[in-house]
Amino acid sequence: MTPARTTPRTSASSGGPARRLSPWRFVMVFGGVSLLMDFVYEGARSVTGPLLAHLGASAAVVGVVTGAGEAAALGLRLVSGPLADRSRRFWLWTIAGYVLTAVSVPVLGLAGVLWVACALVVAERVGKAVRSPAKDTLLSHATAATGRGRGFAVHEAMDQVGAVLGPLTVAGVLTLTGDDYAPALGVLAVPGVAAVVLLVWLRARVPDPIAYEATSAAPPPGRPSPVEARQPELPRAFWAYAAFTAATLVGFATFGVLSYHLVTRHLLPTATVPVLYAAAMAADALAALATGWLYDRVGARVLVVLPLLSAAVAGLAFTGTLWIAVAGALVWGAAVGVQESTLRATVADLVPTGRRATAYGVFAGVMGVAALGGGALTGALYDVSVPALTVTVAGIQAAALVLLRTTRAARSGPTANP
């Protein structure tokens, strides 16, 4: 009997995953890992725009670099996803990706040359590309038992606790050191090491999380279980869903461009930008929990909110009035919360286990191309005309709403869970 078909109830000799950690405990511990790592990289991302501007970057350069970073974080999963599926070494890919991020961020604070800083910004995102398809696949097994929307939403909410603490820590150190980026980012090495240690412990406790999914879905006689299912091609509904997602990202600004606007227009001092980013991450967590809960009840129709949020970001965040720009940043955080939780949950329901890491890789690749276009487009339009930026993004998001209505994913609810 292969490990993939061994269930926790029948693996007494090996101590299967569910005998050691329940599905919810697995989600919570994995959430703790993500909390610590979000502390690291969200702390860094909160000051990416001002840091690059300090080294001489223009808004267009910030847009291209941060967009390229997101493209790397998403596009390279086209490689890491299929490789994870073929090797079945999901834990190895996950750990390697976290290590790369944990190393890149503290070194970024030491960069004194623009091109070095740009390379490290992208390197940190490459770490996310290495780990994400494997990590999401591991997590998807446990959420088969907890509920896709709820499981991914709770994980994302725990992410955002770290995403709040990290920027606040960076803001505090910047204030104490007079905007010195070296200690502000160097302190993030501590949670990075802690995240890797906790992840290694979790891997030792639950070496084969697929057993959670094996026992959560009992197929009718004669049908393969989700664990055994293999498809030569990804479902058509998956591709339609990916197209809708890409459209929402093409018109979505990066926080690098938002923070560039806030600092260069003298709306906020540099040390305050991470505080706003932390507030945006709190909005992220709330939006993830709300849409995850709704997803388990009404399905992918809840995603109609994403184009609306994305259009509102452009209309609010780039104004010259502080409170309106702050509101735009909070809306930006809410949109990211939907992207990072409910979008991932839908992929797990559309694609069977045997192709899931590949699907996450392909899905992220599509998102990566869109993110690069979105970062470059919003950065370039910002340099030309803010009204043109607002109108263009609104048009793109209107097209995304139309596309959502035509996709099979928009008409499909969760299939793996009640």
Image (cartoon, rainbow, N blue to C red):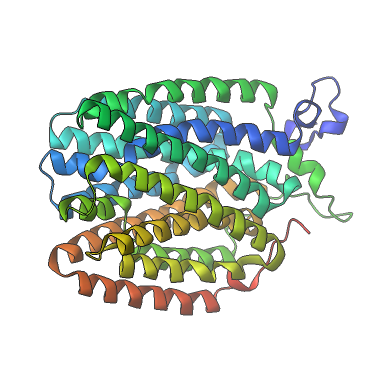
Tell me residue 298's x, y (percent).
Answer: 68, 68
Seen at 49% across and 56% down, the residue is: 339
Seen at 71% across and 34% down, the residue is: 25
Q: Which residue is nearer to you in this view: 131 or 385?
A: 385
Seen at 19% across and 30% down, the residue is: 178
Tell me residue 115's x, y (percent).
Answer: 15, 37
The quarter of the displayed image where residue 253 is located: bottom left
Seen at 23% across and 36% down, the residue is: 119
Q: Is residue 17 left or right of residue 284?
A: right
Q: Which residue is nearer to you in this view: 114 or 39?
A: 39
Tell me residue 228's x, y (percent).
Answer: 73, 45
| Furthest-left residue in this view | 56
The quarter of the displayed image where residue 134 is located: top right
| Furthest-right residue in this view | 221
Q: Is residue 416 left or right of residue 256?
A: right
The quarter of the displayed image where residue 97 is located: top left
Tell me residue 235's x, y (percent).
Answer: 60, 62
Q: Is residue 350 left or right of residue 211?
A: left
Q: Quadrant of the C terminus?
A: bottom right
